[in-house]
Amino acid sequence: MPEPKKTLIERLFAEHRNALQAFFYRRIKTKHDAADLVQEVYLRILRVKDTDAILNPEGYLYTVASNLVHEHYVLDQRQVALIDLDQPLIEGELGARLRDVLAQLPPKCRATVHLKYQHGLSYQEIAERLGVSPHMVQKYLGMALAHCRRRMERMR
């Protein structure tokens, strides 16, 4: 006797939710969008009229997920195509956002970014100016870049 629709879907998501989230995260790189796409897979499978016709439920789940990754990519490309980054207004807006994001960094992280990208100093030169090791400069830059990536992504 086939499994009832709701039970099948609940079982699939109980077993595959984390793997699906990881699947999306590896392909789209944003945790927020990955969680949304997992929910979208769930909704799309709920809309399937005849779940008995699905011979391989796990395979179907990942087929839907793959299609969503493709749709997400296409939508992102359309949005990027609509934005002319050379427009002074867009350039100014991005600059203002980036300044706000950089202002949130701890002082040494902010100084490291400034010295590296505004003045082109080496890790060693930055380390000497800030009184830290070159390895700490590398850590500060990594922390700053990760922070900027997260915050700018949320501002989309």
Image: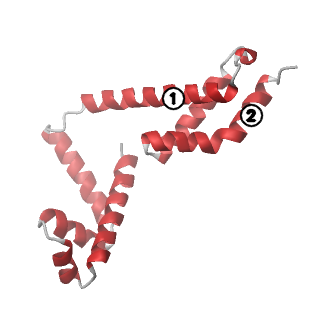
Which residue in the structure is indicated by mark 2? 10
Position of residue 128 in the picture relative to residue 68 (left or right) = left
- The residue sitting at the bottom extreme is 131
Tag shown at residue 66: 1
For marks 1 and 2 on the same chain, the one whose residue lies earlier in the sequence: 2
53 shown above or below 109: above
Binning the other alpha carbons within 10 Å of mark 2 as few (below 14), some (14 to 19) or many (20 upward) gives few
SS for callout 1:
helix
**Which of the pair 133/86 is nearer the observer?**
133
SS for callout 2:
helix
Tell me the amino acid under the disc marked 1.
Answer: Ser
Give the percent coordinates (x, y) of residue 129.
18, 81
Give the percent coordinates (x, y) of residue 106.
33, 72
Give the percent coordinates (x, y) of residue 143.
36, 65
> Does the rendering let one see residue 104?
no
Give the percent coordinates (x, y) of residue 45.
65, 24
**Which of the pair 56/33 is nearer the observer?**
56
